[in-house]
Amino acid sequence: MPTRSSVLSAVASLAAVSVAAQQTPDLTPYLMSDRAAEIALARSALPKPVADSATVLVLTKSGYVVAEQGTNGFTCMVQHSFDGDIHGPGVWNVNLRGPICLNPPATRTVLPEMRKRAEWVMAGVSPNEISVRTKQAYASHEFPVPAPGAMAFMLSPEQHLSDTRPHWMPHLMFFYDHAIPAATWGVSGVTSTIIDGSALDPDAQMTVILIPVRKWSDGKLALPDSAK
């Protein structure tokens, strides 16, 4: 007959397994089976004349890898829900896909954390441990602060950034050292002209400024939902 301690131990083990399952879901749905489609989606974040010469990364079971090597220093990829707030309610929303292209300074200094995050996620590292590792990497300067001029383009008309407003607005992202507060730019919430995007990933240890723009990468005019 099992003892009370053995039953409690078994319950605790099951609880631990349950928590682990919540932290590390089935990651297969995040992988696009059509690599050509993923490359095209990644490039759609940037106007074609620049995107055609950019390096493109695709997500694999071991993280992001180079699918096409570019020549202009830009890097394009498709971000997923776990690239944002790793503790947020939508961290495992498989519907979210954010094509993004980073310019050369951002490729050198912002992309390393993005790639390492994906590597950890695909390896099954828990969100709490990812937070710890990220902060340690910034503290040790393994992850550098954003270089001057580091920015990214999210202009894809195919983006799905939330289930309520999937296409939101085409926008630019500017990355700065976390020591420079977002208030320096007079930023505010999502209805502001200049938006504080730092909360999108609190672990990233950087200030992120979002500026919506008028047109998608294909040149079509972006209008508010109420105007469509």
Image (cartoon, rainbow, N blue to C red):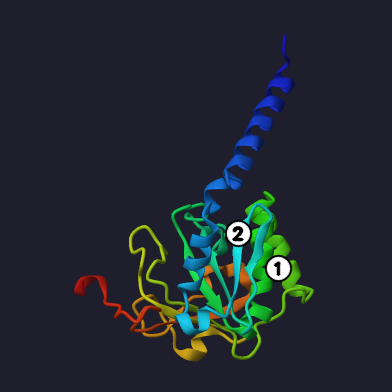
Q: Nearer the viewer, residue 32 or 171?
A: 32
* Residue displayed at 65% across by 74% down: 69
* Residue displayed at 72% across by 27% down: 9
Vertical side of 56 occupied by 182: above or below: below
* Residue displayed at 64% across by 60% down: 118
Give the distance between the C-alpha atoms of the residues marked 1 and 2, in whole angstroms: 23 Å
| Tag of residue 145 | none
- Residue type, mark 2 in image: Leu
Quarter holding the C terminus is bottom left
Q: Secondary structure at mark 1?
A: helix
* Residue displayed at 68% across by 80% down: 108
- Reading the image, the residue beneath label 1 is 135
- Reading the image, the residue beneath label 2 is 59
Mark yes or no: residue 176 visible: no
Instruction: Judge from the rendering whether residue 2 lies leftward or rightward of residue 104; answer left or right.
Output: right
Vertical side of 138 occupied by 209: above or below: below
Quadrant in which residue 140 is drawn: bottom right
Q: Position of residue 44 (x, y in %)?
A: 45, 72
Instruction: Judge from the rendering whether residue 218 lies leftward or rightward of residue 92; answer left or right.
Output: left
Q: Position of residue 173 (x, y in %)?
A: 50, 80
Mark 1 closeness class: few <14, some 14–19, many ≥20 residues within 10 Å: some
Q: Are marks 1 and 2 in contact (CB under 8 Å)?
A: no
Mark yes or no: residue 164 visible: yes
Quarter holding the N terminus is top right
| Residue sitting at the far right | 140
Instruction: Judge from the rendering whether residue 115 lies leftward or rightward of residue 211; answer left or right.
Output: right
Vertical side of 41 occupied by 224: above or below: below
Q: Nearer the viewer, residue 84 or 159?
A: 159
Q: Position of residue 202 (x, y in %)?
A: 58, 69
